[in-house]
Amino acid sequence: MTMKEKKEKLELQTWSDLPTELLELIISRLTLEDNVRASIVCKRWHSVAISVRIVNQSPWLMYFPKYGNLYEFYDPSLRKTHSIELPELNGSRVCYTKDGWLLLYRPRSHRMFFFNPFTREVIKLPRFELTYQIVAFSCAPTSSSCMLLTVKHISPTIVAVSTCHPGATEWVTVNYQNRLPFVSSIWNKFVFCNGLFYCLSLTGWIGVFDPLERTWNVLAVPPPKCPENFFAKNWWKGKFMAEHEGEILVIYTCASENPIMFKLDRINMVWEEMKTLDGVTIFASFLSSHSRTDLSGLMRNSVYFPKVRFYGKRCISYSFDSCRYYPRKQCHDWGDQDPFENIWIEPPQDFSSFI
């Protein structure tokens, strides 16, 4: 082909000739309205627009400052950071998030309260001394079915389960006997799934509390088996637990290895290793993790970790499609992370008044 023919061919190329990867990158930056407009250009654009269309909103990573009251919220879908003064949180530590609400604890006064950083609404709770500050709640505190739960081991075979609800005057504590060892620590994880609280212990055992029947049971499911090269300094700390559509997921990490994902098989009472998330996105943090579907095609089938690099421009993530971390060489020893430093939280649908 002559130079003239090559030039004529280039002039005849249109937007529809863009490589799929580049087209995905461009359309993924569009608003939902513009994405819909782009999808009617041609069949190829329609396919790409649908694959990257964001139906759900990703949670934001909230950073708790070491000093002062300026809090940062990082949006991984737009790679933007928003800042706001929240003096109401002075002297508090975050415990859990769900449905856009924070559960906070003031160690000096043993005060616990709910706070919505987007509406500034506060819901007070009875005083309670938290041993490990690991506590969870089932749903938004504005719901009549909201319940709080914390677990403290008295001995390897006895745990004290404490519960409370908004409007209560005190916490209720009941001791339960375990048939299997269950030790509570600052590295335990909580999720609420199918009406039950699941608690992952430091050593990988799962305790289940039924708030209706008020029963506690440690499942006879041996902890997930990890490769020998996972037995590094902090492998037992660098775990995350999430819930997705009724399934319990656990992510094991090791600084020098790729993460391993497990799903709890409650029928066969085993942990099943997962090679894919089937398009789901997990937003992992030590105190509370979240799952999403229908996010940008570039974010799907990935785990987003609670750390932002490159001056707030890129969140560390791991893709199960390409079996690698993004950005490259960002393998992190999550066991060294301060569990109270940050947490994922659902932003409001209309956050224009918040910014």
Image (tube, helix red, strand yellow):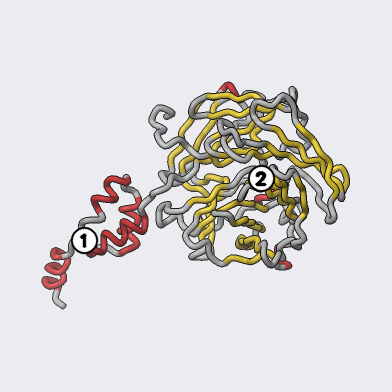
> Going by the image, does 71 lie left or right of 160?
left
Q: Residue furthest front?
A: 213
Residue 289's tag is: none
Say which of marks 2 and 1 sits in front. 1
Image marks 2 and 1: residues in contact by CB distance under 8 Å: no
> Going by the image, does 140 lie left or right of 300?
right
Q: Residue at x 70, y 39 (%)?
A: 149
Give 152 or 299, whichever is nearer the viewer.
152
Q: Position of residue 249 (x, y in %)?
A: 61, 56
The alpha-carbon separation of the residues under discs 2 and 1 comes to 47 Å
203 versus 94 height, above or below = below
- Give the quadrant of the N terminus: bottom left
27 versus 288 height, above or below = below
- Give the quadrant of the C terminus: top left
Mark 1: few/some/many CA within 10 Å (<14, 14-19, 20+)? few
Q: Position of residue 172 (x, y in %)?
A: 77, 33
Q: Please, what is the three-letter code of the amino acid marked with disc 2?
A: Gln
Give 343 or 97, whichever is nearer the viewer.
97
> Going by the image, does 7 lie left or right of 286?
left
Q: Which residue is mark 1?
A: 42
Q: Position of residue 338 (x, y in %)?
A: 67, 41
Mark 2: few/some/many CA within 10 Å (<14, 14-19, 20+)? some
Q: Position of residue 132 (x, y in %)?
A: 76, 38
Q: Residue at x 38, y 31 (%)?
A: 352
Q: Which residue is mark 2?
A: 337
Q: Please, what is the three-letter code of the amino acid marked with disc 1?
A: Cys
Q: Secondary structure at mark 2?
A: loop
